Image: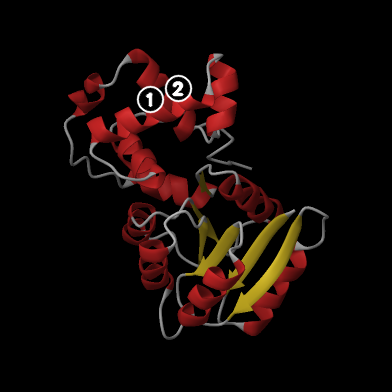
Amino acid sequence: MIRVVVAEDHHLVRQGICKLLEEGNEIQVVGEADNGRDAITLARSLRPNVLILDVSMPKLDGLETLAELKATLPNQQVLILSMHADVGIVQQALQGGALGYILKQSVAGELLAAVRAVSNGSVYLSAGVSQVLTSNLNVAKPQNLLDRLSPRERQVIELIVEGYSIKEIALTMRTSVKTVEKQRRDAMRKLDVDNTASLVRVSMELGLTTGTKRMFHNG
């Protein structure tokens, strides 16, 4: 069972999200908040698998909540929910450690897929978000930065960008989870990033994208 806390300041919207999430038997909404401050309190006390944060909330907005939460609960998986696919906000969210960013107008199946992916430690961007992000890339690092990676490190990063979990990568590459985790850490050090979301963002900026349906849903 995937345990979720939903932070959304509009009561009717929050009710709709909670109802949608609990229609199946795999997700349980264990807490609700209408502001960022309460979202942090619930995350610390309930330790959900996924915290869903609306970008626009009182007391602390989604990005402020993300930053404060990650300072004390760095392993908390966060999914950002927003009305707008603003490239600056998306980049801030990924840099801040969010693993997912979807739009409120996303179809129901996409929300469920995003929660599943984020709970599994995979990055999930909805179609509208990924399109805006890839069309507004400002490449701040030289293209040859990827040349620092070994072939195996690059393969690991490619699979992470595609949305595979560490366990799935280990199975795909026929190696151990421990080896994959080391290759990921080494690649992150070489690319000068400190979390998986930033690793995906930098890899996209460097052109390491595949358009895979696991991460970039076009349906």
Q: Is residue 202 left or right of residue 17?
A: left
Q: Nearer the viewer, residue 115 or 31?
A: 31
Image point (53%, 16%), residue name: 175
Q: Position of residue 181 (x, y in %)?
A: 44, 30
Q: Is residue 184 visible?
A: yes
Whole-Å distance between the Cαs marked 2 and 1? 6 Å
* Residue 65, quarter of the rendered image: bottom left
Image point (30%, 39%), residue name: 202
* Rendered-image quadrant of the C terminus: top right
Q: Is residue 158 visible?
A: no
Residue beneath label 1, please? Answer: 183
Q: Position of residue 91 (x, y in %)?
A: 34, 54
Image point (19%, 23%), residue name: 144
Asked if residue 106 is positioned above or below residue 219 in the image, the reply reads below
Asked if residue 107 is positioned above or below residue 207 in the image, the reply reads below
- Report the amino acid beneath label 2: Thr
Asked if residue 119 is positioned above or below residue 174 in the image, the reply reads below
Q: Nearer the viewer, residue 138 or 17?
A: 17
Q: Position of residue 174 (x, y in %)?
A: 56, 14
Do the CB atoms of the residues marked 2 and 1 lie less than 8 Å apart? Answer: yes
Q: Which mark is residue 193?
A: none
Image point (58%, 41%), residue name: 218
Asked if residue 190 is positioned above or below residue 34 in the image, the reply reads above
Q: Is residue 125 left or right of residue 188?
A: right
Q: Secondary structure at mark 2?
A: helix
Q: Which mark is residue 179?
A: 2
Q: Secondary structure at mark 1?
A: helix
- Report the amino acid beneath label 1: Gln
**Circle 1 crowding by C-alpha within 10 Å: few under 14, some 14–19, many from 20:** many
* Residue 188, quarter of the rendered image: top left
Q: Position of residue 179 (x, y in %)?
A: 45, 22
Q: How is the image coloured?
A: secondary structure
